[in-house]
Amino acid sequence: MTTTSPSARTPEFRLLATPLVLFLLVFLGFPAIVNLVYSVSHVSFETLRSPQLSGFSNFAAVWNDTAFWRSVWFSLRFGALTALLECGLGLFLAIFLSPLIVKRSWLLAILMLPLMVAPALVGLMYRLVLHEFVGPVPHYLWIWFGTGVSFLGPGSAFWTLVAVETLQWTPFALLLFYMAYQAIPADIGEAAAIDGAGPLRRLWRIELPLMAPTIVAALLIRFIDGFRVFDNVYVLTGSGPGGATASLSIYIYEAFFKQRAIGKAVAASVLLFAASFAVLYGLNALATRRKGAAA
Amino acid sequence: MITALRWLVFAIAALAMNFPILVTLATSFKSARELSTNPGLWVQAPTLANYLTVFQVTDRLNIALYLFNSMVAALTGTVLAVVLALPAAYAIARGRVGERTLLPLIVNLRAVPLIIFAIPLYMMFQWLALLDTRLGLGLILTIVNLPLALIILVNAIRELPAELDEAAQIDGAGRTRTLVRIIAPMCRPAIVTSLIFGFITAWNEFLFGLMLTTSKAVPITVGASFFFAASGGGVQWGVASAVMIVGALPPVLLGLVMYRQISGSMTAGAVKG
């Protein structure tokens, strides 16, 4: 045995990383290649194993499909709106409720509960909550206000879904912000108080800037999750009414399983892959440059 | 005064965010007769009849099987992810193998919409006869769990003092032996956190369960949605509610018991990742 420093790249280290690399090659590398090949092929369920190269016609079909662009628009709008609402609400609740939670951490468990339930089940639960005969929301709306709202109808389905997503995932933002808020050293606030800064001023000038990295991270994570939403939307509205609530994930799913248009579904996947790769690459480059500037 | 206001806000927030769960819980205790007359939150004559019905197997719905499928697939996806991630995390943190490529690749995987791999995986599973099997679903759930497991474990190993490894090296232990005998026991809290997180995520997964299973390996999240589609003469809301409560229970109980670990590592995963 040679005496190597702990940071040396020994063959044994490579060996330890090998199972993971092999697993990724089989379950992500191979599918990625299949995606690329099939996206430029003519393929159907009958000719799955013998795709015929067909140039970029699949991409053209997706590009010229208004339903595709409608789903892109839905996903962008849904991701941005829910991320903003969740982070705004979460930030307010984290700071306003922190004096209560500091003394009784079990309050956090109650607020975190929605995060533990499958989004698909929460979606199904809202089928019950909003049901016109057995659901309590229409019931109490009728008793107290004498009105009825069609929550999953053409005009309101989008907003209902935004509310469902926001109510389930605000706790995630709340949790991150509460942790970041607690991590602010107490003496910073005390020093500012001695200098005569009021609570609002301290919040604006000291605490929020210190929490900024967490806020950015939370906005990003929630946007990504909102953008790729599938479960709760799928069980609540399918994609209806009339395709108005099809997210990009649902568009790809339906192209494959309902229309059996493999080429189109795969081409849309490749476009989505390219777009996420570009965005992530840009974000990583930005983060590295930030770190470089800070060091 | 301000404290009272804080409690009021807490009560409203807790009620609003947990509202669907509370409604479903209340409905699961209502009899069929009460359901048709009382859509409110208050249960007049609580009954357990719906929960007994849940486990009666019909030819189309088998809730016990769906729960078993979820359990097996989620455990497979959770344990396998940690088994694959731990040695790799050690190699990344100590050997600096793949620190520039493998780590960022997997971390970014968390931000990629996984649906883009779903169609080729569906075809691949068809060739490998893994469609509608618990093992197949477990393998996919491994991919879903890998990013967070790797982040948590790499961070944990980086925080261990390097002298530990050096001492083991001097004693003549190889890297693998050091990992098994020293590093893994020291990382036990991080391993437990990855397992809890992985289990909750895997149990709650829906998209791949929907695409890759049809009958034998259907997980509960998908099985519960069958329940809504299956009954032609209208949904039996009481039984459906009991199904949803039973299906939500394992991750919820785990989460309530372990909420401290979860809240801590959620932050770590978000900010460092």
Image (tube, coloured by chain):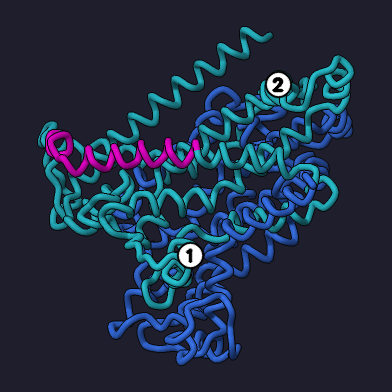
Chain colours: A cyan, B blue
Position above or below: A122 against B50: above
Q: Quadrant of residue A62?
A: top left
Q: Earlier in the sequence, mark 1 or mark 2?
A: 2
Mark yes or no: residue B72 visible: no
Query: In x, y percent, where is residue B171?
Result: 88, 34
Position above or below: A205 against A56: above
Q: Quadrant of residue B72?
A: bottom right
Position above or below: B50 against B221: below
Query: In x, y percent, where is residue B79?
Result: 62, 56
Q: Residue A8 bears which disc, if any?
A: 2
Give the residue displayed 33% in from the left and 47% down from the top. A249
Q: Residue A121 bears which disc, if any?
A: 1
Part of the protein shown in magenta: A60-84
Q: Are marks 1 and 2 on the same chain?
A: yes
Give the residue displayed 64% in from the left and 52% down from the top. B197
- The chief SS type of the magenta part is helix
Say which of B185 and A251 sits in front.
A251
Q: Amino acid at mark 1?
A: Leu
Find out whether residue B27 is within the magenta segment: no
Query: In x, y percent, where is residue A267?
Result: 22, 39
Say which of B200 and B185 sits in front.
B200
- Kindly report the distance in space between the C-alpha atoms of the residues bearing marks 1 and 2: 48 Å
Query: In x, y percent, where is residue B252?
Result: 64, 64
Q: Amino acid at mark 2?
A: Ala
Left or right side of B25 for A233: left
Residues at discs 1 and 2 in contact (Cβ within 8 Å): no
